[in-house]
Amino acid sequence: MLSPIRTQSFEPTVHLDGGLDAVLAMPCACPRFARDEEIFGEGETADYVYQVVSGAVRTYRILRDGRRQIDEFHFAGDHFGLELGEAHRVTAEAMTDTTIRMIRRGALSDLAARRGDAARAILRLTAEGLQRSQDHVLMLGRRSACERVAGLLLDIAERTHAKAELDVPMSRQDMADYLGLTIETVSRTLTSLQDEGLIALPSVRHVVLQDRRALERMTA
């Protein structure tokens, strides 16, 4: 459920890239969510499109047997919750203390109908989401556990603009539920990468990419 909306002043950490941010000129609510707090639930009416201002978000579905499958991780600047239908297909939760920008879906549709640049930006967001979903399916079907974990670390580094040191917002269980592995396999794989000198693990949520080129070769 949504927390009470609190408009606020803050220094945005999103990156304007000439896309949807550049064409939106409407006031937006920016509520804050605590770690593990639900932003919206699967099946709820999709009244808004969301953008991560700061923090990180996971989106997931609960399978019939009770297992959780994480669909995607979203970082500062990322949009999520853009649906074709009237309801959300996934649940969204904050992984850390997170600020979210909420854009009313109706206003966004009206803007897209009036402005070609807004329509193109929305189309690009949709295409990017589809591409990431396709890459995720390929990873689950064709890569080893070591390749999956290495690929996730590199993806986090790229999307958070980190060079070598990563503050990883997700838990080992989050990683397992995204990669289609058990938490034990994720932990063993991280230890193996550390033993090989490819990464260092100063703490549970901090990773140092010691040999990024080797990790990239592993996932090529």
Image: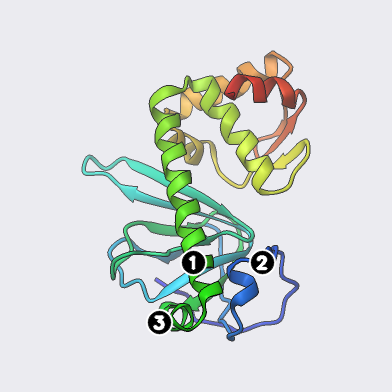
Which of the marked residues, 2 or 3, is nearer the chain's N terminus? Answer: 2
Name the spot of residue 140 as percent of width and height, x first.
Answer: 41, 30
Question: Secondary structure under badge 3?
Answer: helix
| Separation of residues labelled 1 and 2 (CA atoms) | 12 Å
Q: Is residue 154 left or right of residue 40?
A: right
Q: Are marks 1 and 3 in contact (CB under 8 Å)?
A: no
Question: Secondary structure under badge 1?
Answer: helix
From this viewpoint, which residue is outermost toward the front? Answer: 116
| Separation of residues labelled 1 and 3 (CA atoms) | 13 Å
Q: Which mark is residue 18?
A: 2
Residue drawn at x 58%, y 77% is 30
Residue beneath label 1, please?
122
In the figure, 53 relative to 195: above or below?
A: below
Three-letter code for the amino acid on which mark 1 is drawn:
Ile
Front position among marks 2 and 3: 2
* The N terminus lies in quadrant: bottom left
Q: Is residue 13 left or right of residue 83?
A: right
Q: Nearer the viewer, residue 142 or 127?
A: 127
Residue drawn at x 56%, y 44% is 170
Residue beneath label 3, please?
106
Q: In the figure, residue 194 lies in which quadrant? A: top right
Name the spot of residue 100 as percent of width and height, x first.
Answer: 57, 69
Name the spot of residue 22 as percent of width and height, x first.
Answer: 65, 73
Q: In the figure, residue 47 lies in which quadrant? A: bottom left
Question: Secondary structure under badge 2?
Answer: loop
